[in-house]
Amino acid sequence: MLKKKTVIYTVIVIIMLFVLSNEYRTVWNPQLEGSSENNNGAFLSSQYFHELEQLYERIRLNNEQWYIFDDAKQVAAKAVVDKMMEDLVKQPEALMNHVNDHLFFEMFDENIRRIGDITQEIHYFRNVLNEYSGAPERLTDMIELTAQGKWRLFSARFHRYHSEDMNAALNVKFISADGRFEVVYNAETEELVTDAVNMGTYNYAPGSLHPLKYYRHYRYDVAPWKKWGNVEDVSYEDIMKLESKHGTAEEKKNSSEIEEKIKQVKKQLQ
């Protein structure tokens, strides 16, 4: 009987602690923490990134006081990501070719991976970030950058779906040296491909054959794409219904020609 009562009391205590943890959960509020204009560190300054680290630690520690299960890191990371998104939307031109742009992407990606399951809003924010790739408008210029090792030619398997506006079999994909940015060009038009079906996107976790990196890429980039597509109005299911031009004779011929052009430019640069 005593054993039974002990178990009951233990369960009651656990439930009460769980309720308290949710009641006192720290929710980040920009008005409480101060907006980017009110913080001492100007957007993208060294102080700005230091303040983001402080924000993360402050919210993490506050939440650890109440949580039985440790999701304090996720709560803190989400606060940092939300703030960075808000600040970039307010000052979009500031990040363009900024000396600290790499710090922004590194901190953003690091906190994305701390969050766990990302939201639809964060998933679509990849399109905003990909605008800062610095990729040239023309394929010829991208071939030269690739020959210099600044970009890599990559499989465009999921970027060759039928389009009435262009021959999708001639689409080729490039990824930045750090694996974050993707761009797709059409070899016939020489222009960037930006339609919702075949567009390139930003990677929160660049892919790799390494098991852990592959898992992260699937979790933070591939799985959300399959869930929400590239944009709100075109789902993954809509994309999969389209005819794929990947693997056709025309596609293989074009891909080989692009590879050969890159090799030729490399020889010229040596």
Image: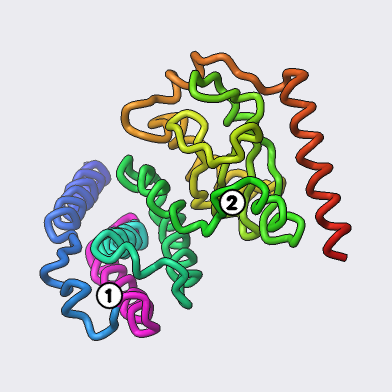
Residue 23 appears left or right of 74: left
Q: Is residue 104 above or below residue 258?
A: below
Q: Earlier in the sequence, mark 2 or mark 1?
A: 1
Separation of disc 2 and disc 1 at Cα?
29 Å
Picture coordinates of residue 201 (x, y %)? 49, 44
Q: Nearer the viewer, residue 25 or 101?
A: 101
- Residue 72 in sight: no
Residue position for label 2: 206
> Residue 171 sits in which quadrant?
top right
Q: Which residues are magenta?
A: 43-70
Identify which residue, 55 or 182, lies in the foreground: 182
Quarter of the image with the N terminus is top left
Closest to the observer: 16 or 249? 249
Residue 250 placement, left or right of 235: right
Residue 139 locus on image (x, y percent): 64, 45
Residue under numbered circle 1: 58
Q: Position of residue 6 (x, y in %)?
A: 23, 49
